[in-house]
Image: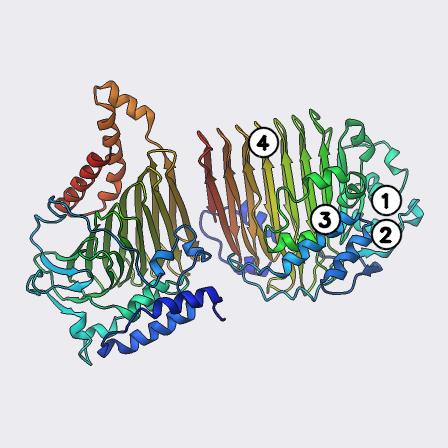
């Protein structure tokens, strides 16, 4: 926090704000877990893509889908238009797959679970009851769920460690599992929706993600169901020189409702690490999805050493009439953020909202914003973005509001402030 | 980095049709500009700054033909006492022009400068254009610097008694005009520059304006009524301490117009206003691209752009304010608005702010909408016929941009042009 201490605070900025920014600027999750890992060889090529697919025991159509994406990616150029500067990324000098060795076979009892893995979740502040489930212990799901009801899917480097409250959610008809599980258990849903919002060829990072995503979360809320609890995914990057490529697919069928929270942290390391995620949300008629992110990847030290390069593609497709999506994001981490959660307002009377707070400090750079694509009649969108920069950090808001000819009587409200 | 093949071949194809004139003291600047152009290539559809405007017809080896438009109506600024400098299809016409002597100003033809080895314009020709190439590339301006066929150098040392009026006549259906003017306003001097006329079938024009400390330049431009003309214009302006630059552009019709304004506030307390009103009907594409750099303390900049569009016309606004570190107390304002008179027209706006100083006020706004039904109803309920009421509200909408013209008589003349357009097109 040297940078902020040396910075003269401007008149009119109260102490509370200064303390808040300072608090945010101190990274509490920078420790790492010394755990035996299994890596795929460094670099990315068709063999690695096949290997990831194999490790996840995927059907052939999925492997093909990935290979096509990889083929496409090799023809693409890295985008340079964002207001972020970072050294050239060597995409062949990264691990694309890393999982704790102990996860090779699913542990059957608490004794079998690697205590270090357990300790990691404890340290991250995830309640013990849940932690048993997170560690993948069979039987823990039957333990009464006390306190706050939040179902969690925890992703550790390349693999999903476990998903809580699956049974209880199942009773309501909600499917909440890792995407690797969904590919095996619900191929018809995955086939239908995967890549339908963010196409394979969407952009450089999304295409790379399509080829090498290792895990992530899958949610399906059936028609008319109000998801009985908050759903949450916790992403943790632990291994060094490892890129994390997770894929999230959320489908809210007609008249359903779900609220989803995503959190992420990573250890403090000297070398920068790559994170390129894709989130796809499908909102059918009268359905509503709330998606919140607390992004707290390691931001690098005050000299800009290390940190996560966060290149994320998030998009919601309000397909049905009167559907609604709300993005809320708090961006405090990452050395470089490149992220534009967007809404395609296809259905008539559909609504999209985007609320963002981006706080950058030291050498952090954030280029973030949203796209509101109005296609249907009477569609409404609302954008509120706040950027706070301290130290030598940079913050950019980049937004697009597009009203197509059929979007009669549609409205947008945009407000963006910087401090 | 090597240019993509498509870009390189398009650039070379265009260059093959151009010839660098006798250059004299502008030779070095022209050759440097040609090297710049070769390095960046002519604009293509995939360039971010040409995303909303297709550059194809502006860079093609030959211009698409444009029918010459005839009218008996008096030209804009006709009633004003002014010093007329006339170009016909991009070539200076001494017989149509006034005598170029006027107290407080000296005017030289570019052709004459190009015969000399020493001239003040050498210090300016291509200099501001080159500065304006970063951070955004403007290849058509580099092409202009390298190949400009004609133009004038205006050196303002006092306060000339009347405006200097640059008139661009269009007589040939296939003319491809490239004009380059340089204007230097000395400390404490003040001048008004008027520009009007369609110029050519295709017009590439560049003006470099250097305003010294305490100097003032007013600029009012009316781009001609020819329906098929195409134009790409650049104005590069550098402002010294306490200097003032106020520019207004009216565009009526024209199948394709791209007006770029690149303004750099380098002296403290300088003021720059750029404004534009455009009215388009049918096959009309109008692009205002503005880049204002604040690089001094306590400067003010204003951008006011209004577009009225109908029958599938397209309006584009790309406006940027860059506040450099240290440019404290900057007051930046930007508004871009469009009135879409039907469902087929579109307005594409990209406002940008980039700020590296922490004690500044910068605001921007952009709207796009139809005529206010409530206001229309109010007027109609007071007995105003629908058509007249629509025109009244349209004119009121455009007024905010026209009000940026300081000289009331000039502003009135512009308003009468707008009224004429509305009468013809409603």
Chain letter, disc 4 residue: A
- Residue at 46% x, 31% y: name it: A410
The tag on residue A103 is: 2
Chain letter, disc 3 residue: A
How far apart are the two marked residues, 4 and 3, measured between alpha carbons?
26 Å
Asked if labels 1 and 3 share a chain, the reply is: yes
Q: Position of residue B342 (x, y in %)?
A: 35, 33
Under tag 4, what secondary structure? strand
What residue is shown with label 4?
Answer: A324
The tag on residue A136 is: 1
The part of the image, by quadrant, that contains residue B384 is top left
What residue is shown with label 3?
Answer: A235
How far apart are the two marked residues, 2 and 4, measured between alpha carbons?
38 Å
State whether residue A333 appears in this view.
Answer: no
Q: Along the horizontal axis of the image, is A247 left or right of A140?
A: left
Q: How is the image coloured?
A: rainbow
């Amino acid at each position: 926090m040297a940078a902020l201490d040396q910075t003269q605070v401007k008149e009119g900025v109260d102490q509370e704000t200064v303390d808040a920014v300072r608090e945010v600027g101190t990274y509490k999750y920078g420790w790492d877990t010394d755990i035996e890992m299994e890596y795929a060889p460094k670099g990315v090529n068709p063999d690695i893509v096949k290997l990831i697919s194999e490790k996840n025991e995927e059907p052939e159509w999925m492997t093909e889908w990935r290979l096509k994406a990889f083929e496409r990616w090799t023809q693409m150029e890295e985008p340079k238009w964002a207001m972020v500067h970072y050294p050239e990324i060597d995409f062949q000098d990264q691990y694309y797959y890393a999982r704790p060795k102990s996860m090779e076979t699913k542990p059957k009892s608490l004794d079998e679970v690697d205590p270090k893995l357990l300790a990691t979740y404890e340290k991250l502040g995830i309640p013990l009851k849940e932690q048993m489930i997170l560690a993948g212990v069979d039987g823990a799901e039957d333990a009464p769920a006390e306190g706050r009801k939040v179902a969690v899917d925890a992703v550790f480097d390349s693999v999903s460690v476990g998903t809580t409250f699956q049974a209880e959610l199942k009773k309501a008809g909600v499917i909440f599992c890792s995407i690797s599980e969904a590919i095996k258990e619900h191929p018809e849903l995955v086939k239908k929706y995967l890549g339908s919002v963010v196409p394979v060829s969407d952009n450089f990072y999304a295409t790379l993600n399509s080829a090498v995503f290792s895990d992530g979360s899958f949610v399906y809320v059936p028609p008319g169901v109000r998801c009985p609890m908050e759903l949450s995914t916790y992403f943790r990057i632990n291994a060094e020189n490892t890129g994390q490529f997770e894929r999230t697919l959320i489908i809210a069928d007609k008249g359903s409702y779900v609220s989803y929270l995503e959190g992420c942290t990573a250890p403090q390391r000297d070398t920068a690490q790559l994170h390129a995620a894709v989130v796809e949300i499908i909102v059918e008629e009268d359905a509503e999805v709330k998606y919140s992110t607390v992004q707290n990847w390691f931001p690098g030290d005050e000299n800009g050493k290390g940190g996560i390069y966060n290149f994320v593609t998030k998009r919601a497709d309000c397909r049905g009439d009167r559907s609604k999506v709300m993005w809320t994001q708090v961006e405090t981490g990452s050395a470089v953020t490149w992220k534009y959660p967007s809404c395609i307002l296809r259905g008539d009377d559909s609504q999209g909202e985007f609320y963002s707070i981006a706080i950058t400090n030291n050498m952090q750079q954030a280029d973030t914003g949203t796209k509101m694509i109005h296609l249907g009649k009477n569609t409404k969108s609302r954008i509120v973005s706040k950027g706070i920069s301290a130290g030598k950090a940079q913050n950019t808001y980049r937004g697009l509001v597009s009203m197509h000819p059929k979007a009669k009587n549609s409205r947008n409200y945009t407000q963006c402030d910087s401090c | 980095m090597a240019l993509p093949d498509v870009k390189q071949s398009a650039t070379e194809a265009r260059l093959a049709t151009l010839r660098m004139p006798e250059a004299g003291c502008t030779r070095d600047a022209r050759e440097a500009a040609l090297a710049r152009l070769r390095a960046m290539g002519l604009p293509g559809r995939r360039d971010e700054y040409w995303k909303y405007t297709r550059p194809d017809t502006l860079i093609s080896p030959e211009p698409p033909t444009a029918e010459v438009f005839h009218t008996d109506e008096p030209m804009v600024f006709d009633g004003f006492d002014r010093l007329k400098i006339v170009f016909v299809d991009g070539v200076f016409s001494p017989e149509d022009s006034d005598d170029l002597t006027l107290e407080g100003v000296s005017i030289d033809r570019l052709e004459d400068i190009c015969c000399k080895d020493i001239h003040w314009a050498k210090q300016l020709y291509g200099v501001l254009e080159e500065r304006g190439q970063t951070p955004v590339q403007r290849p058509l301006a580099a092409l202009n610097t390298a190949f400009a066929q004609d133009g004038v150098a205006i050196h303002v040392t006092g306060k000339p008694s009347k405006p200097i009026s640059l008139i661009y006549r269009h007589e040939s259906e296939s003319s491809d005009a490239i004009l380059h003017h340089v204007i230097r306003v000395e400390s404490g001097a003040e001048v008004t520059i008027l520009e009007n006329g369609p110029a050519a079938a295709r017009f590439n024009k560049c003006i470099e304006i250097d305003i010294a400390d305490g100097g003032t330049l007013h600029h009012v431009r009316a781009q001609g009524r020819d329906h098929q003309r195409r134009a790409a214009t650049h104005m590069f302006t550098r402002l010294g301490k306490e200097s003032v630059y106020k520019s207004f552009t009216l565009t009526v019709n024209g199948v394709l117009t791209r007006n770029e304004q690149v303004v750099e506030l380098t002296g403290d307390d300088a003021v720059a206003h750029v404004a534009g009103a455009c009215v388009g009907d049918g096959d009309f594409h109008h692009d205002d691209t503005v880049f204002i750099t604040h690089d001094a303390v306590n400067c003010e900049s204003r951008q006011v752009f209004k577009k009225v569009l109908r029958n599938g016309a397209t309006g584009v606004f790309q406006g940027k304010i860059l506040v450099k570190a240290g440019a404290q107390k900057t007051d930046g304002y930007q508004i871009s608005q469009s009135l879409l008179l039907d469902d087929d027209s579109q307005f594409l706006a990209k406002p940008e702010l980039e700020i590296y100083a922490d004690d500044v006020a910068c605001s921007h706004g952009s709207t796009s909408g139809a005529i206010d039904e409530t206001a229309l109803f109010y007027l109609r309920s007071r007995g105003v016929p629908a058509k007249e009421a629509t025109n009244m509200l349209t004119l009121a909408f455009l007024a905010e941009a026209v009000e940026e013209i300081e000289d009331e008589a000039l502003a009135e003349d512009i308003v009468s042009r707008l009224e004429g357009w509305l009468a013809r097109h409603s």
